[in-house]
Image: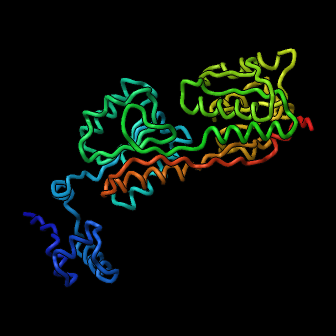
Amino acid sequence: MAIERRQPTMIDVAKEAGVSLKTVSRVVNAEPGTSVNTQERVKAAIETLGYRRNNAASELRSGRSGLVGLVVEDISEPFQSELARSIEEVLEREGLLLLSASTGADVDRGHKVLTALAERRVDGLIIFPSFDDYSFMEPLLGDFTQVVFVDRPPKGLAGGSVRSNHRGGAFAATSRLIDLGHTRIAYLGDPTSLYTGAERFAGYMEALIDHELPFDPALVHLQNPVGGTVGNAFKEIMSLEDPPTAVFTGNSLTTIHLLRHPGFESDKIAHIAFDDLLLADVLAVPLTTVSQDVSMIGATAANMIQERIFGNTGDYETVVLPTRLILRESDLINLRS
């Protein structure tokens, strides 16, 4: 008959390391008050004995689960997958486990996902907003659940916020094209009902105003980039009596749809895109882009949530990170000055 071996306890670790039980508890729970040398002895004893922390007991004592939920629209989308990777890296170092889920921008699915995470008593939620109102979450959240929104500000729910300067990035891109002599600049982007769409279009408009250029609504297409909408809009804009000499695309999907459109000739019209595509520098005409530091957004959000989980529960912060204009060659096509 096989004899089941007893799992080592913190008492065993204390004996092996030659320290008190309290010292082992401090090291295991990452609490202050122990020297580096003592920590190393305790960790060596843990490794030797094969000790595994009793998470269930720890949760009962601390009131924490050690879980953080991340809710995005589509985890396969490059921006969101990079966001998840950078968040997970930070949380893992802090001993927190990330649970990720996609909503597909579907309201019912989003409600189910967020409700399920709240019922599992996650310590924190990082949300890539897809909906207009998150107030339904308020009664579901426990006293210990912290919330941080990324890419867009909170909607209907108190929380921290980490996002890029979308307006500033669009202003810089449009100003760059104007400085190169373009006065007819097309804008293809998301509808203004979306926060990022509104902010980036506002940046485009502010650049026109700042440079005293007239606004022509015929040069603007604001719609979700699905099917052939982007290509059809570009074809219509280019058929104008006075067509644009440059185009600014307001998001990565719009850019991809435009690049794939057979009527788009990258060597005939100047182009700047918001969001730095993975292969932007190896296109036939390397693409000038507005780059967001996605890793920094994720790391900042993860640090914000873990600090609040472990005790910093003051007023929620809003962090707006700068964008960067990466100059390649596409903005230099069809120079007007």
Task: Identify the residue shown where x is 65% and y is 41%.
Answer: 168
Q: Is residue 19 left or right of residue 186?
A: left
Q: Is residue 164 left or right of residue 157?
A: right
Q: Is residue 220 left or right of residue 319?
A: right
Residue 87 in the image, given as x and y percentages of width and height: 45, 51
Residue 163 in the image, given as x and y percentages of width and height: 53, 44
Residue 135 higher or lower than 20, as above or below: above
Task: Identify the residue shown where x is 34% and y is 53%.
Answer: 308
Q: Quadrant of residue 255?
A: top right
Q: Quadrant of residue 254?
A: top right
Task: Identify the residue shown where x is 41% and y is 53%.
Answer: 304
Judge whether residue 231 can be spotted in this image: yes
Judge whether residue 284 can be spotted in this image: no
Task: Identify the residue shown where x is 33% and y is 83%.
Answer: 37
Residue 278 in the image, given as x and y percentages of width and height: 65, 45
The extreme left residue here reads: 1
Residue 61 in the image, given as x and y percentages of width and height: 16, 57
Residue 249 higher or lower than 125, as above or below: above
Q: Quadrant of the C terminus?
A: top right
